[in-house]
Image (cartoon, grey):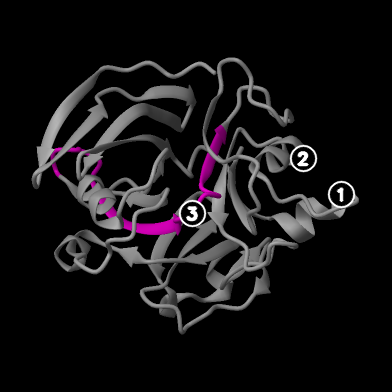
Amino acid sequence: MARFGCICALLFLGGAIFVRCQTWSTIRPGLEVMADGVLTEKGRSIKFVLLRCDPKLRQVRIVDTYHEVGSKLSYPAFSLAEVTSLTGAVVTLSAGDSSSYVLPDPVGLLQSARKVLAKPNYRAENAGFLCLSPGAATLAPLNQWKAASCVDAVQRGPFFTSSFRSTTDSHTDQSERGIVALDAKGRLVIMITEGPVTISTAATYLFSSKAGLEIRSALNLVGSRTCGLLVTNSPGKSKQSESALAVGNVDGLVASAIAIY
């Protein structure tokens, strides 16, 4: 597997060391990757990848893996590799775990192609949602969701802004992370870690002025072993091409996926 090359620099933030790439590599217009970043937490080094997407230039969708993809097979398709193969997406990443080990059952709100396939779970703590509409993406607390305003939407959590950094003492769980954020220009910034890390450390990096990402809000998508990202230069292929990028688990069970075309 080839990596996208870049030059990295050390950042010292709040006692932790962050190594991040200084250049974005363009995959296609409106789609960039920053590879081989490193977070250091409690003496451990955790690699991560950032992907930046302009929804004005790329089509972004939330794919329901059971009804939309699984209906084309004799069994439910629920992996990122299968979503890539069957939809022709250039980028796929996990948008949420399944509550079932047998079927890809969404946990909370799932809306695809204006159809609400799973209802919101308003009892979930610090819940938020990603809303996609033509040419735009929104992140907001779950209580602001209105079905008519979104073509696609998915509930995850916690939802956080820059103030989250001062209230993260209880967020000490270390897990593989998939986080989607919005920057000042309305672009999606996706962070995928290749090892377990706390939300506190990830949030500190994303909102740091030294990181230069200009993040306004973020939503934790996945905090488990199903966290994954697959970038391919050969749409319609289930396995990544020689120049593609695969991070984390691209074969695990997911109830929904974010697909970028």
Q: Name the residue under label 1.
A: 72
Q: Mark 3 points at which residue?
A: 224
Helix, strand or loop for disc 2: helix
Residue 75 spot, x, y in % from top left: 85, 53
Looking at the image, residue 13 sits to the left or right of residue 89; the answer is: left
Looking at the image, residue 234 sits to the left or right of residue 36; the answer is: right
Q: Quadrant of residue 142?
A: bottom left
At 20% from the left edge and 38% from the top edge, which residue is drawn?
212
Residue 108 spot, x, y in % from top left: 56, 73
Image mark count: 3
Helix, strand or loop for disc 3: loop
Residue 121 magenta-highlighted: no
Q: How crowded is mark 2: few (under 14 residues within 10 Å), some or many (20 or more)?
A: some
Q: Which of marks 3 and 1 is in front?
A: 3
Q: Distance between the residues labelled 3 and 2?
A: 24 Å
Helix, strand or loop for disc 1: helix
Q: Earlier in the sequence, mark 3 or mark 2?
A: 2
At 25% from the left edge and 41% from the top edge, which residue is drawn?
213
Q: How crowded is mark 3: few (under 14 residues within 10 Å), some or many (20 or more)?
A: some
Q: Which of marks 1 and 2 is nearer the N terminus?
A: 1
Q: Which of marks 3 and 1 is nearer the N terminus?
A: 1
Segment colored magenta = 209-230
Residue 213 magenta-highlighted: yes
Q: Which amino acid does label 3 sit on?
A: Ser
CB under 8 Å between discs 1 and 2: yes
Q: Which amino acid does label 1 sit on?
A: Lys
Q: Name the residue under label 2.
A: 86
Residue 54 spot, x, y in % from top left: 44, 40
Circle on res. 182: none
